[in-house]
Amino acid sequence: MPRRAYVSLAAALALATPAAAHASAAPADAAAEVPLESAYTTQESASPQIVVDGRTRYQPIDGFGFSQAFQRAALLHGARGLSPEHQKEILDLLLSRTKGAGLSILRLGVGSSSDDVYDHMRSIAPDDPGGPGAEPAYQWDGDDGGQVWLARQAKAYGVRRFYADAWSAPGYMKDNGTDAGGGTLCGLSGTNCASGDWRRAYADYLVQYARFYAKEGIRITDIGFTNEPDLTVSYASMRFTPQQAAEFVKILGPVAAKAGLKLACCDAAGWAVQESFTKAIEADPEARGWVTTHTGHPYVDPADHPLPTRRNTWMSEWSPNGTTWNESWDDGSGYDGLAVASAIHQALTGAGVSGYVYWFGTSLGATRGLIQLDGDAYHVSKRLWALAAYSRFIRPGAVRVGASVTGDGLKVSAFRNAGGGTVVEVINTGTEAVTADLGLATGDARRATAYLTDSAHSLAPVDAVHGRGSRLRAELAPRSLTTIVLGDRRDGAGPAGEEAP
């Protein structure tokens, strides 16, 4: 067996408890974050080396989430919903920290349509009150396409982050007269609407939506006024240029802040496109001060680099392309579980995101969601377990810390939870099993638990970490994601107790 010469891991690998914001908004590449020589040296060793350095801290973690907008929440209960037994099972899969993913962010869709057909969300002010200065006739059904019920369930499981995002303003506020097919909010630069300037009315509309939820016992924490402003589609949509978005931020920002809401922007369809929106906001001192979170989607191009801001950033919607329902972990399709795990890793380490919000949790037919509904039956994709491997153990308030690895085919990231305890995520993209040396703090190494996700396992506990003190070895199955939890339930690293509905 090759000899290894270790230096003081207590000094070199002390896992500091995170305190506040990350040291730098721009993460380094995971394979180059920590020089291996700073932790230990090896002689004649061919084993891959994984080193975690808690002194090097990157972005804080706000959480991981999903959406059931466009009335998908209504599929889970009520006349079109599941039996109570299966309903509870699906809620557990999405929200439980012991049985499922333990997701901690729920993204809600703010309706804009005058009707409530399946693919649209009904507006809380469907009728033109007669002008932007007239008193709107708000309507609230207490259900909101099933989203109120779902939000209550999520709150009972411990979710505290509720992000309400609008795809469009009501049609009468826009220059095309409908909530669908693009169009722009009247009053923004470049518009010419006979009906007048609707910017402040739209801001009030969004805040009123949050007030309705407050009456239902749900505190909306984050509000967004646009979704994919760079696209025109046949359903609810609204266009903004980056400059128009910065302009409206200065209208909505003070109104939202007075209501206790954090402002998010701009959910562009491509990460590079979102960069242009972020730049426009950051270039305007007034707009910059109102935006709490910069949000983008990686449909057009991947989330592989940080956005140009020191504010937190979220990957706020994504599901992989695919035309058929897929339950596989690794079939080469690009929309299997391993593909999702790799996308999460890239967003966290390459783009430095603080939040990761998947698209639909559940839907019908050839859905790219996590769970497929089929009458009162349901089917679970391995995509769920790829997300669960991160979301169940890496909790809001955690911070990403330094992690490095030698050897081809391994992707590593590490996180320190606010209450203590460290989570190490290792993706083995190779076709052979790998045994890697793992350099960690002595105290944490005494409580190591591993969970395996691959074609045969779904976040299953496995006996994959061996050794004593700081000399650990991790057995990594081929084409797999191994989650190594260092710490016990009391320090926040493992599945904690939860209040179930």
Image (tube, rainbow, N blue to C red):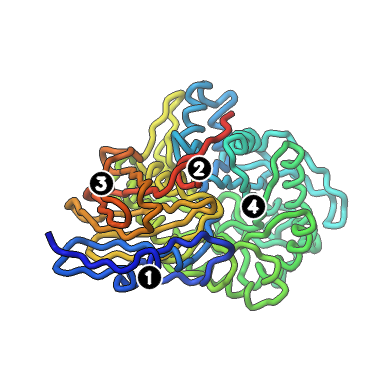
Quote the CA–CA distance across marks 3 and 2: 38 Å
- Residue drawn at (25%, 58%), measured in percent from left and top? 437
- Residue drawn at (67%, 51%), measured in percent from left and top? 221
Mark 4: secondary structure: strand
Image location of residue 187, percent across then percent down: 76, 66
- Residue drawn at (48%, 49%), measured in percent from left and top? 358
Q: Badge 1 is on which residue?
A: 33
Left or right relative to 122: residue 102: left
Please identify the residue farthest to the left as the structure is shown. Answer: 1
Q: Badge 4 is on which residue?
A: 166
Image location of residue 449, percent across then percent down: 35, 44
Quote the CA–CA distance across marks 3 and 1: 31 Å
Image location of residue 102, percent across then percent down: 49, 41
Label 3: few (<14), some (14–19) or many (≥20) C-alpha neighbours in 10 Å: some
The disc at residue 331 is 3
Q: Comparing marks 1 and 4, which lies closer to the viewer?
A: 1
Mark 1: secondary structure: loop
Mark closest to the chain's N terminus, 4 or 2: 4
Give the quadrant of the C terminus.
Answer: top right
Mark closest to the chain's N terminus, 3 or 1: 1
Q: Are marks 1 and 2 in contact (CB under 8 Å)?
A: no
Q: In the image, what residue type sits under mark 3?
A: Asp
Q: Quadrant of residue 260?
A: bottom right
Label 4: few (<14), some (14–19) or many (≥20) C-alpha neighbours in 10 Å: many
The disc at residue 490 is 2
Image location of residue 3, percent across then percent down: 16, 64
